[in-house]
Structure formats: C-alpha cells, structure tokens
Image: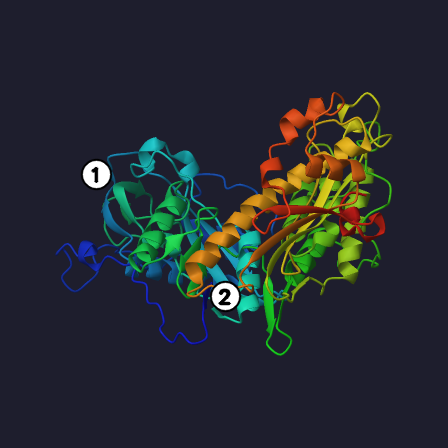
Amino acid sequence: MVARVQDEHAYVAIDISDSDSDSDGDSDGEDETFAFYTFLMDSDHAIQVFATRAVTDPDTITYEQAMANIEEREQWRIAAQNEIAQLVENHTWEEVPLTSAQTKVLPVTWVFKRKRTADGTIKKYKGRLCVRGDLGTEEHNAGETDTHAPVAGLPTVRLFLVFCLSLSWFTYSIDFNSAFVQSKLAQPVWIHLPRGFMSKNTTRMCLKLKRSLYGLPVAPLLWFKTLFKAFGELGFIPCTHDPCLLLKKGILVVVYCDDCGIKFEKDKDNGTITLTQKGLIDKTLAAADMTDCNPNYIPASTNALGLAPDGTPMTETWNYRSIVGMLQYLAGNTRPDISYAVSQVARFSNAPKKSHATAIKSILRYLKRTAACGIIMKPTTGFEINCYYVDANFGGLFRADPDSEPTSARSRTGYIIQLNGCPLIWKSQLQTQITICTQDAEYQALTTAMRVVIPLRQQLAQVLSHVIAEPREPRTLIRATVFEDNNGALSIAVNQRITNRTRYYLIKWRWFWSHVGDTPEKVSVVKIATDQQIADYLTK
C-alpha cells in the first residue's frame, strides 16, 4: 500500500526483474525450459507419492478434491494451467534429466483455493504449486543460513491509514502476483514434475529451479531481499521499528500480506476508513455449523472461564483449534470487542471441554449479530498517542480455575492504544507474574502497555522526520498520554519511589521511569475515573 502527498504527481515504477540473467542463449524460439503442457483430467493417471496435511479451511482443497469436484473441476484445471504458464513465463525452472539432480529431488503439491472478496463472494479460483520444503534439508535453503523474513503487522497498517487520513494523503493499493518467483536462487533446487502434468520427453525428467517457489523455507526471505533492494534503489529507507514500513519524503509505503480478508471502505466526505471482516465471520460461522444460529448480545459471560478439569469433553465435531485461530484473527485485526472472550477460549485448545465449546458458541452468536461491524477510523488533528486505557483484573481467575492450579492466582491485563483517536493496538492477556494486590496488578498492566507506547512514539517520530518535507508545528508534534485509574499504580509511575513492599516487582517493572514526565518529549501518566475506563471490557 502506497501513500503520497496530494501535490505529488509522479508515480513510482519498480522493476524487480533481472532480464539479463534468465536468457542464457539456450532458447531458440520455443521455450525449452518447460516441455510439458498436457494436463491429465483423469486423476487415475497420477500417483500420489506423499500424504498432504489435513486442511480445515473449506475453501482450501487438495488435488484429489479439486479433480473430484465435477461442478468446479474445469475452473481448477484452468487455475492449474494458469499457474504453470505464469511460472514458465517467469523462467522459474528448466527441465532436466532426473539423474542430473545434485541434491534430493523434492516433491511438489498443489494447493487450490477459492479466493473470496471481503463479503464472502468467490472472485477467483487459484491454483498454487508449492514445494514440499518440509521434506528438504539445509542444502535446499539456497545458501541462506537464516530463513526469517519480516512481515508487517496490522498495527503498522493501521498506523499507515491513520497517518494518511490525518495528513489528507492519497492512498493506493498494489498487488504483487507470484511474488516469491521474482527472487533468484543462489543455488539450484531440484523438484519433481507437478502432479497432473506430463513431460513430452521420453526419459525421466525433473525440474531445476532457478527462481524461488512457494513452499521453500527460504522463499519469504529471498522475496523480502529482492523487493527491498528495489525500494532502496528508489531512495526508500526502512523504518527502524518495522522494516516493512518504507519511508521517503512525501511517500510512505507499507508492505503486508493480506490473508485476513479485511475490507477497507473509505468515506471521503466524512474522512473515515472502516475496517471489517464479514467474510471471515461468515466462514467461521459455517465452519462451526452455526450459520443459522440465534444471535447474542454479548460475546462472553461476566464470569471467568476456567479449566473445568472434571468437565465433560466437547462433543461438537468442528475443529476447536481452527475456530479459535479464526477468532484470533478477528480479535487482533478488526474486533477488539471480542478480545477478552477469545483470550479465554484460546487457553483450552489442547483439551477443550463442553463449557469451552459453549463459550465459543457464545462468541459466534455475538458475531452473528454484529457481522457488519468493525473499526471506524476518523482521526483528530495533531499526532497524539493515547493509551485509552490501562486496566487490570486482580486475581481474575480466582475460583474459576481450581485452587491447586497456579493460574488461579493470575491477574489479567487489558489496554487500548489510540493514535489520533483511532484504535491502533489493543490487548487482553493473563499476566506472567503473580501479584499480591490490586495496585501491583495495575502497575504490571501499566508497564506492559508502556512496552508498546514508547516504541510506537519513537516509530511515529521517525516516520514524521523522514516523510514530512516541512514539519508543521504543532500539527506534527507527538504527544503521548497513558490513562490510569489506580491511585497506587499512578503514584509509583509518577513519583518513582521504591519501598520495601514494592521492591519485589519494581526491580523488574520500573524500566520505563526515564520516559515519564510532563514535557512534550516524555510520556504523561494521568488519572482517569474508573467509570470512564474503556479497557475494563478487556479484563472482565
């Protein structure tokens, strides 16, 4: 996603191809890198040589399922042919005798997926050829010792949107097709021929990969290096706190993977952007066989959800972990109102009981009623980071979990961080350290929120200094405020005193004191009334 100032009329063209390296002089008109184009409609002609992992997403299917689906088989066949044609066009491989492979020849698998719009309608049938990189070794990592690749989180995307709305910038969305294939391999990898296709050669053949392909452990890292090298040549620099946020005077770019089905609706008249995930909600309801369920007004009971070690195991046939995973996507991206409820049910993914399945159903009934709801971003003027708000529920699991369980003494932290009045980051989680009173639990929640507020302020300062051509005070002055409703925790943070009673946890949790103050470059910690504590619903 790219943003630029209104008076900037230049468009950025990024060339990430390397045309002088793929034409080795071997081609004489007909593409010899791939000689098999015959698709076998009858699945009996292909032999499955490995078992694919079970997939719970009904829109993601295997080769067998695609070929057995009479109504959609033709769409899947076209999707597979389009994938092969695109890979051939990108000079991804060359066909070589199987005996010439210098490393283990890896199998490949097809992943077919119905791509849907944010409202759930099918927009495309996609076939993806993937290498079974999980069956490879280090020699298949193309000379890379580390395979980690940065990925922009949704908080960075939301920061991008708030920033652009606040400065009235134009935004553009750019999609990279077959992204991983754009990267060259430093060392070749050999793979078997794709299932469903046959070679025109009489000898046994395999494919020698020259470019990266989905499924290779190193593929995301190679794509990251290729893309960001191109951006660097255009004058962009990565943000220190998130390298997927790229900065240049008058232009801001965020590179992210949209696998969450988020719908962005921009209202120019009202200056708002609304983020919703109705398609994912409908999919979650369908996965739990609750499409026609009765809606609910609240996502969870006011009582904490406990272990229930002697409870009846759940009898529902749907996959508990899969449903929890989809709910976590929703809670972390567009639905902070279900964060507390989802955090509770996520604790019991290993051995869910009937009470835990019932709690999930309660969340789904609530989502049924509020499926069209989401986050509405309408920023205020200036750049203000407000931690609305920090809260804790001391001993929140007391009597919910058995007294013999250490978790029964744990408290819960909840906070909401806003930028210019727009929700940016929120959290509902159990505290890691057991506290002995409300003040201690509130202070631990405060310092946990500070871990996010302080880096966020530094990130925003860097963005403003590199992107704004001429800083305009006070519009670009960053102010950060944290709101606390517990007098004891507020006093410790502001007065910064260690006593014998607080020494046991302040040794660990006082690290942010140097960042607290009343000056503009510091973070202010101020009192707020308990009845105005918005984060309360994230803790109980």
**At 35% from the left edge and 54% from the top edge, which residue is drawn?**
227
For marks 1 and 2, give the CA distance: 64 Å
- Residue 248 appears in the rendering: yes
Q: Would residue 531 be found to the left or right of residue 237 on screen? A: right
- Is residue 412 among the parts visible in the rendering? no
Q: In which quadrant is the C terminus drawn?
A: top right
| Residues tagged 1 and 2 counted as in contact (Cβ below 8 A) | no
**Of the residues under marks 1 and 2, which one precedes in the sequence?**
1
Taking 29 as reference, is 52 left or right? right
Nearer to the camera, 146 or 80: 146
Q: Residue furthest bottom?
A: 269
Tell me the crowding category of disc 1: few under 14, some 14 to 19, or many 20 or more residues within 10 angstroms, Cα based. Answer: few
> Image quadrant of residue 291?
bottom right
Coordinates of residue 316 in the picture (x, y in percent): 77, 43
Instruction: Estimate the x, y position of residue 171 in percent, counting from the top left.
Output: 49, 69
The total of numbered circles placed on residues is 2
Give amino acid for label 2.
Arg
Q: Which residue is mark 2?
A: 472
Check disc 1 and report its element: helix, strand or loop. Answer: helix
255, above or below 413, in the image: below
Q: Position of residue 86 (x, y in %)?
A: 34, 61
Residue where numbered disc 1 is placed: 100
Q: Of helix, strand and loop, which one carries label 2?
A: loop
- At label 2, counting other C-alpha atoms closer than 10 Å, the crowd grade (few under 14, some 14-19, many 20 or more) is few
Q: Nearer the viewer, residue 373 or 92?
A: 373
Residue 142 falls in which quadrant of the image? top left
Q: Nearer the viewer, residue 469 or 258?
A: 469
Expressed as whole percent of the image width and height from the top left, the position of residue 426 reads 67, 49
Which three-letter amino acid code belongs to the residue tagged 1?
Ser
